[in-house]
Image (tube, rainbow, N blue to C red):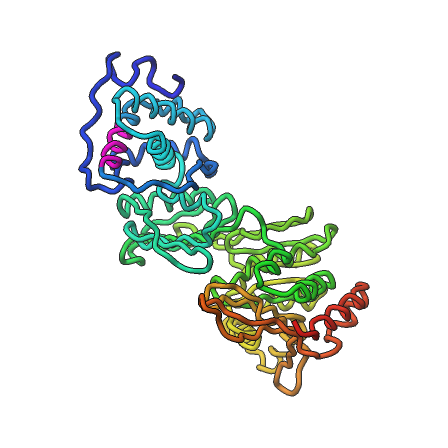
Amino acid sequence: MFGRRGNEGFGKSGGHSPVPQAMPATVPVERAVTDAAAPVRESIAVAVAPSAPPPSPIARKRSPRTEDYYDTKSQVFSALIDTIDLSQLAKLDTESAREEIRDIVNDIITIKNFAMSISEQEELLDDICNDVLGYGPLEPLLARDDIADIMVNGAGKTYIEVAGKVQESEIRFRDNAQLLSICQRIVSQVGRRVDESSPICDARLPDGSRVNVIAPPLAIDGTALTIRKFKKDKLTLDQLVKFGSITPEGATLLQIIGRVRCNLVISGGTGSGKTTLLNCMTRYIDADERVITCEDSAELQLQQPHVVRLETRPPNIEGEGEITMRDLIKNCLRMRPERIIVGEVRGPEVFDLLQAMNTGHDGSMGTIHANSPRECLSRMESMIAMGGYTLPAKTVREIIAGSVDVIIQASRLRDGSRRITHITEVVGMEGDVIVTQDLMRFEIEGEDANGRIIGRHSGTGIGKPHFWDRARYFNEDKRLAATLDMMEKPQ
């Protein structure tokens, strides 16, 4: 077989050499990957899997692990490492390498006559392939589309978020060395590194999922890995309506806001769905517009044909070569953009984004961490001050009021549901105060017997919004008027 050492079979002298001594039965399943095999696994991953392997069929319900299973996996893996020819395996693509490993493991199981059911044998094959080519214990979680977040707190604790609620997973790592090795494998795919000299890293998986790693010595109890997973099927505003995040009238209002090129800021707390909502809003950008995105780790999924994606770069090991978000946004202005989209505004780059919004790049968008539209405005003012600008407070507020047209507030409620709680228009200035008005808001009315929040979205009856003339310019005024009338009716 192509991946094996010549015609020697599993032994080195033509016969079947004994399988190496099994590890103690109390060792977790991932412990089957021996310390000696770890460099081998890494070399295969680098040579054979430049991108993540396709998810194996491990999303099915897995049977409980037994000590016999752990013992068997240890023996099979040791025999595999003695058998496989790495120089030949490195020439294969990822899928062929996975099939080659599965064939060899099947032969080992048959020759050693391990007593295993068909389902146990399939799970063993998947586990070993994941350890060699994929992300090890993370693979079962990455294959599940119902998981929103994966949170690894050291080798012994892994939590997941399902349906808005955090729960502990049975997934464990062999030790912190294995966890750090997998983290290094993830971040190396996007040209980044994580180690003691650079213990914090933002990266992404090939599917766009956001990854954050913080390693010792900063993480005291072992490497902390957080993965914000993106669903394979991109959400749309229509789906948000089905989930109850917003009403059909509210979704239509958001469509109009996107089409008439309002400058938009999406505000919300961590995990409230800001990036998901930003992706939804980008669907209403015309196909002939030139769009430039700036992100710390590229995760936006725009469908337009004319998109330029930019990503920041951390400093190298000498502390040089860093490219910040401010650098990207400043460079955007020289690239003839029609819209600039900033994945997340965290600091002084907000000033450059506001300048872009106010200088002919209508329809630009960004997200900010804030708990209300009013707090969002205060946060922008504070972030401008962080940049060392010595502008008077009134001048800063005038810049904000003249740049931002609409703030959309996304919130994650206590029952785990995500709702769009405010669509707020920035009207202008009165004295030293930025004036806003809500076009729609979500009002909590209580909760049902299962603890789910009960509430309703309602219009605020403001008449014509401030961007009415813009809507008329884009021939959306009639639809806007009809939408606002529908929002006034009792739900």
**Residue at coordinates 37% horizontally, 52% vertically from top-left?**
225
77 part of magenta stretch? yes
For the record, the magenta segment spans 68-78
Residue nearest the viewer, comparing 181 with 65: 65
Q: In this view, does 327 lie to the left or right of 287?
A: left
* Residue 45 rendering spot, x and y as whole percentages: 39, 34
In the rendered image, which quarter contains the N terminus? Answer: top left
Q: In this view, does 363 lie to the left or right of 206?
A: right
31 part of magenta stretch? no
**Residue at coordinates 42% horizontally, 56% vertically from top-left?**
161
Residue nearest the viewer, comparing 38 with 332: 38
* Residue 10 rendering spot, x and y as whole percentages: 28, 19
* Residue 347 rendering spot, x and y as whole percentages: 51, 67
The answer to whether 76 is drawn above or below residue 355 in the figure is: above
**Residue 29 shows in this picture:** yes
Name the outermost residue toward the front. 449
In the rendered image, which quarter contains the C terminus? Answer: bottom right
